[in-house]
Amino acid sequence: MLALASVQLAEGHQDAARHSFEALLAAHPDCGRGWLGLGLLELSRTDLPKARECAGVATDLMPDHIGSWHALAWSHILMRDPSAARIAFERALMLDRAFAETHGGLAVIAAMEGRETDARAGIRRALRLDAQCLSARCAEVLLLQIAGKYDVAKVVMEEVLSRPGGRDGTPYRDLLTARILS
């Protein structure tokens, strides 16, 4: 059931994925991966309260799963709750101090809170760990926007969106467009 729901989600069949995740969770309410999958689905549909709720259940069921903490953190970021996002990223950091996306996420939060020095340090740390770190690039764009450098931010975002993000090399832009259109 989990495999079917995950494939449906990956292929952009959101209604079918929702049905499969809900059937899975009705039969196995303690399946953390099912809650995470449903949370990611809700995140992609921008039902942020539902995404946060599902990711929260996933972290309760799988406290050692870094991806669940990231899903929870990003739902908080998108809901403009940097304090709650920081707590989730700090839990992820306790699991793996060398995961670039966690440092990049903390840099996003620092930028949101106007702590430019901390944001830049987090960006540098994340990019040292992974030169392609998406969350670090998001933090860079956010700092550029805060500084009023919208043209430069647009160029950086264009570069990020042009990078391959899918398993098959599909650029992030196409993945986001497909997700929005579906």
Image (cartoon, rainbow, N blue to C red):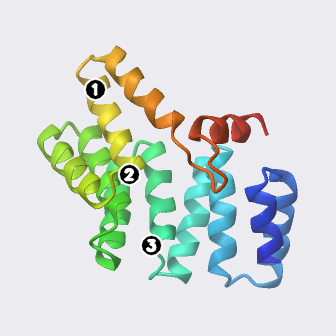
Residue 31 as seen in the image, left or right of residue 125 = right
Q: Earlier in the sequence, mark 1 or mark 3?
A: 3
Give the residue displayed 26% in from the left and 31% down from the top: 143
Q: Which residue is mark 2?
A: 133
- Can you give x and y, in whole percent of width and height, for residue 4 in the image? 83, 71
Q: Which residue is mark 3?
A: 66
Q: Label 1: few (<14), some or many (≥20) within 10 Å? A: some
Find numbered disc 1 in the image and state the secondary structure of the residue it sits on: helix
Nearer the observer, 52 or 170: 170
Judged from this view, the residue extending furthest toward the front is 169
Where, by quadrant of the figure, is residue 22 drawn? bottom right
Residue 134: assigned label: none
Give the residue displayed 20% in from the left and 49% down from the top: 124
Q: CA distance from mark 1 to mark 2?
A: 17 Å
Find numbered disc 3 in the image and state the secondary structure of the residue it sits on: helix
Give the residue displayed 63% in from the left and 39% down from the top: 176
Nearer the observer, 178 or 171: 171
Q: Quadrant of the N terminus?
A: bottom right
- Can you give x and y, in whole percent of width and height, for residue 76 in the image? 45, 52
Q: Quadrant of the C terminus?
A: top right
Q: Amino acid at mark 1?
A: Leu
Q: Amino acid at mark 2?
A: Cys
Q: Label 2: few (<14), some or many (≥20) within 10 Å? A: many
Give the residue displayed 34% in from the left and 32% down from the top: 141
Q: Amino acid at mark 3?
A: Ile
